Image (cartoon, helix red, strand yellow):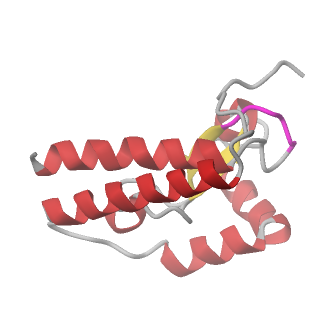
Amino acid sequence: MSKSSWSKKADSAWYEYQHRIWQRCAVCRCPGVQAHHLITKGQKLTAFDPENGIGLCPEHHQGSTFSAHGTPEKFIEWLEKNRQKQYEYFQTNRNRHGYSLTEEYYKDAYHKLKELTRIENETDPSISQKNQCYSR
């Protein structure tokens, strides 16, 4: 399998894992979420890190009033006050860059994420995997 194929598989596995562990929006507790990269997935060294994610409803992910994409400065301030673990991850890793990552890197990331998802499924098989935010 090519480097590009492993990258796509790792990306898919990252989203699958994030949707598995984030069942509600971290901000408003809405029962449906979209997976958001704390650090842009363009920074490949952190793109598939299981810690580089947070679950957000569509409004808090991409809305205009307060959201990770619409008002990123406000969102980072909110992280600092309300989600210390994710804020520390962001601060520690936001300037990590990787160049020329290998096929093996993507393959390892994929397998690690699939294993974490398998463990989550065995730990609590009752959690719904639906990714739909209900109307408020």
Q: Position of residue 90 (x, y in %)?
A: 58, 71
Query: Residue 118 in the image: x percent, y percent?
Result: 51, 51
Give the dominant element type of the magenta stretch: helix, strand or loop: loop
Residue 64 visible within the image: no
The front one of 63 and 30 is 30
Question: What is the total number of numbered labels drawn onto the structure image?
Answer: 0
**Image location of residue 104, percent across then percent down:** 17, 64
Q: Magenta segment range?
A: 28-33
Please tell me which residue lies in front, 97 or 30. Answer: 30
Q: Is residue 116 left or right of residue 81?
A: left
Q: Residue at x 71, y 43 (%)?
A: 67
Instruction: Give the residue displayed 56% in from the left and 65% down from the top.
Output: 51
Q: Quadrant of the N terminus?
A: top left
Q: Which quarter of the figure has residue 97?
A: bottom left
Residue shown at 53%/49% (left/top)? Answer: 17
Q: Is residue 16 magenta?
A: no
The vertical placement of 125 against 133, above or below, is below
